[in-house]
Every structure is written in C-alpha cells, then in structure tokens.
Amino acid sequence: MARYASSGCRGERETGKGEDEGLRERRPGKELLRALGELPPTATASSGLDGDPLHPLAAYRAIVVGGRIEWSAQWMKRLKDYVESGGTVVLNSAQTKGISADLLGVLSVGVTAEADNARCESPGEPAQNLSGQMFRYEKVELKGAQPLIISDNGDPLVTVNKVGKGAVVFCALPDLLGEDERITPFAAHMLAHVFADATPIKVYGDVEYLVNRTEDGWVVTLFNNQGVFKPQQGLAQVDRAAYVTAGISLRGGRIARAQDWISDRSLEVTKQPGTVDSITMSIAPGGIAIVEIHVEIQ
C-alpha cells in the first residue's frame, strides 16, 4: 500500500528501522497535520485510526493502494472509517476482492473490453489528449459513484464515490497498466487529479516538480526542462533566454518563511488579505530550484 507522503528529502523517516517503527517515531502531531491540511478534520480516536500507531491512515489525505490485495474485515473497517473521516482511497479493479459495492460505488458485470482512448468528464476542465496504448478494462455498473473518466463508447473507466466526508476513487484498469505493461495516459491523469487535492501545495508555471512533506512544512523541487537540446552526438545546445517563472502557493495555511536550498537565500513571500500565500521565482534553462517552506502553526 502506497501512502501519499514525503520521501527522499529532509524530514523523511529514519532508516535502519522497520517501516511501522519509523512511521511511529516520525509522525507529526495532530496540530501540525491540521495546519498542513494533512489530517481529516473529523478523525478521532474513536474511528480506530488515530489510536492505532501501526496504521496511521489519519495522517494522510489520500492513499493509493498498490499490488493485489485480499482485504481482511479489519482492514475493510479501517478503510471505511478513513474515508468517512475525510480521506481519499484510490483502488483499481485488481484490488476489489472483499470490498462492497456500497464502498466502491460500482459493481462488476464480469465482462472486459478494450480501448486505446479516454475522455475526462471533470467539469470545467479543458479537453485532454488521453489516447495511448491499447488497454483492457473491466466493465462496471454504477451503484452510486460518478464517472470521472470514460471510454469513447461511454464506459466508466474512473469513478468517484462519495462516502461520508471522503471518497473512493476506482479505476477499472487492473494495476493501471496497458497491454504493454506501462501506465496508461488516463490512469496518470487520474492520479494527477488525486494528488492535486491531496496536498495544499500548488505549483504554477511550465515546470516539473516534486512535493515532500517535512516536520514543519514542505520541500518543493522544481525542474525547468526548457532551453536545453541534447543531440545524439556533440555538445548540448542551450537557449540562455529560456528562463521559466514558477510559482508556489499554500492552500489552507500561512507561509512563515521560505528558503531556496541551492542558492541558500530567503525567498519573498507574497501575503495579501483574502488570498493564499505564494512564492514566485525564476529558474534558468535546465535549472533546478529546491524550496523549503515553513508553515505557521495556527
């Protein structure tokens, strides 16, 4: 099971210890988690989540399940409590054994179909090219869920089922992989939707980025892939004018201070009443910026 959290950066859990032990020692307090938008506001010890240090689901806004799992009754209760408390769980059709249709919001009809294209039904979203390799998906019947992504013939490929204060996101594609055993464009698009809502950090600009959570904030790594052309032979050609302006904003909290690790300088934080705090910076062609954001504890 993959939990959406920080990795490989300052604030990661200690190495050389079992996973559960490391998570237990490095888990932030409830006040910080709520300030960071990482704790569902209604999660309580009575839900069976906070009181179980071995399975700290309440510390995560979204969980992407990996592998093929047969769910025990105990884990089914944990997942249901987590979702009802405000969490989001992402499952695919290879992981639904033992999960009720009420929780998934869909029911398998026992038939598979093939496609190589998909369409996102998210309101207000510009048209996306989600075509790619051939994939085989499981046909399902909606039982309360709403379709997020559909095939060209209208079959639901990704659905969202609201349960309590949270949601279960279901993908009809086993393991999220196409016939070539690579992730399909529509599955990647689904994860982009989930991750955009799973963290209060939003990044603007034509950059790639990584988001990691620390003990008192976030570390955001930005990549400017523009302006560098690497031929098969010879030296790389660099367009020195291909700077990119990127922005980082924090939803649901205030930025206490921000620092660029590479230049080791403090960054100006834009604070205006009624708007989110934000940071703007310019990144050189082929350049990288690593920004540490400290969050005010309220």
Image: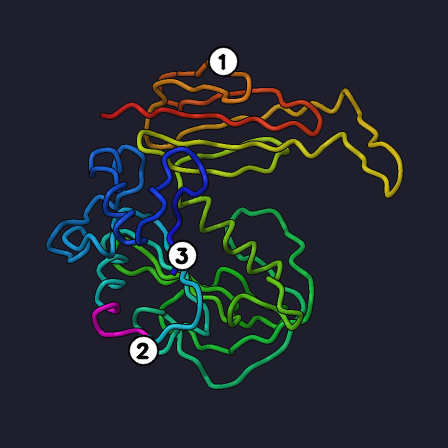
Image coordinates for residue 100, horizontal then vertical, percent? 30, 75
- Residue type at the position of mark 1: Arg
Tell me where the magenta segment starts and ends, as one range: 71-76
- Foreground label between 1 and 2: 1
Q: Residues within 10 Å of mark 2 (few under 14, many from 20)?
A: few
Report which residue position mark 2 lands on: 98
| Foreground residue among 252 and 52 | 52
Report which residue position mark 3 lands on: 2
| Residue at the limit of the structure toward the front, as seen here | 16
For the C terminus, the quadrant is top left
Q: Could you say whether the residue bearing mark 2 is in a helix, strand or loop?
A: loop
Contact between labelled residues 1 and 3, with CB atoms less than 8 Å apart: no
- Foreground label between 3 and 2: 3
Q: Residues within 10 Å of mark 3 (few under 14, many from 20)?
A: few
- Is residue 190 shown left or right of residue 165? right
Q: Could you say whether the residue bearing mark 1 is in a helix, strand or loop?
A: strand
| Foreground residue among 85 and 29 | 29
Q: CA distance from mark 3 to mark 2?
A: 19 Å
